[in-house]
Amino acid sequence: MENHNVCSNDAIGFRNIDVKTHITHIFQSGPNRRFQTHLSFIFVMGNILQRRQTSFNARLAVKKSWFPRVNALLEKISDSTVESYTEKLKKNSFARPETEGEKAAADLINYVNYVAEHVPGSMAEIQSMREEMFSIVNTDGLPHIFLTLNPTDTNNPIAQVIAGRDVDLDKFFDDLKPGSENLERSTFISQNPVAAAEFFDISVKNLLE
């Protein structure tokens, strides 16, 4: 009851926060870095974000010359046909269409292209990056220097601090464990991929600035 009263009080100034911002906040300020080191949380959240972006930004593209054919096929497909045919394909991906609606749905796939915008890792994003690179080359010419940045996170004390290790940066090399220090540093980084990404971001920004 108390929580309900608080949430319904407009004077407090609550505001809606999107999922990506909330996840970023959890990663950066979670208690004891438990979300950063969780074995599956980062993958589950990444999958959820990708599914949301796929659902919200997905489009179906059809060639103009195919409009009459596609329109005729859509008229033969009902909601129940889509649901039943989907369940059939889930059980057997090689299932053959039987009803007229299922045959129309199977035929429709040949005319419709799935286009997803701003979805990480999608072919649309890769194509967009290629087009951006081609535009830069056409505008500014070919690059003269190719540089690959690869800051070593396992040998940098700053990365260890970001990963949550209690390290005195002023005495970092005073108390090393012979033969096991490299393994310990690698273990800390491998258990916290968020810290490794944050260290890479900091290193690249400082270098470019």
Image (spheres, rainbow, N blue to C red):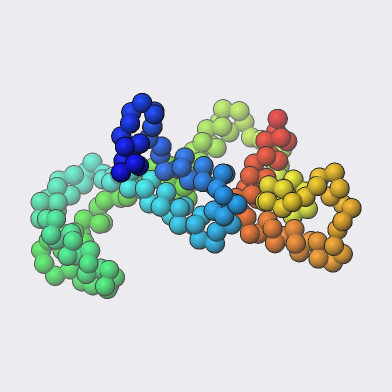
Q: Is residue 102 visible?
A: yes
Where residue 108 sits, quadrant-wise, is bottom left
Q: Which is nearer the eye, 123 or 63?
A: 123
Number of marks in picture: 0
At x 25%, y 52%, the residue is: 111
User: In the displayed structure, does residue 158 sit left or right of residue 20?
Assistant: right
Q: Note whether 3 is above or below 47 in the view shown.
A: above
Q: Note whether 141 is above or below 199 in the view shown.
A: above
Among all residues in the image, which is located at the extreme right?
174
User: In the displayed structure, does residue 52 sit left or right of residue 177?
Assistant: left
User: In the displayed structure, does residue 80 sit left or right of residue 29?
Assistant: left
| Residue 123 spot, x, y in % from top left | 44, 49
Q: Is residue 144 visible?
A: no
Among all residues in the image, which is located at the extreme front?
2
At x 51%, y 46%, the residue is: 26
Where residue 91 sits, quadrant-wise, is bottom left
| Residue 66 spot, x, y in % from top left | 21, 47
At x 42%, y 49%, the residue is: 49
Q: Which is nearer the eye, 158 or 59?
A: 158
Q: Which is nearer the eye, 196 or 89?
A: 196
Image quarter where the C terminus lies is: top right
| Residue 137 spot, x, y in % from top left | 58, 33
At x 84%, y 50%, the residue is: 172
| Residue 1 spot, x, y in % from top left | 30, 43
User: In the displayed structure, does residue 124 sit left or right of residue 97?
Assistant: right
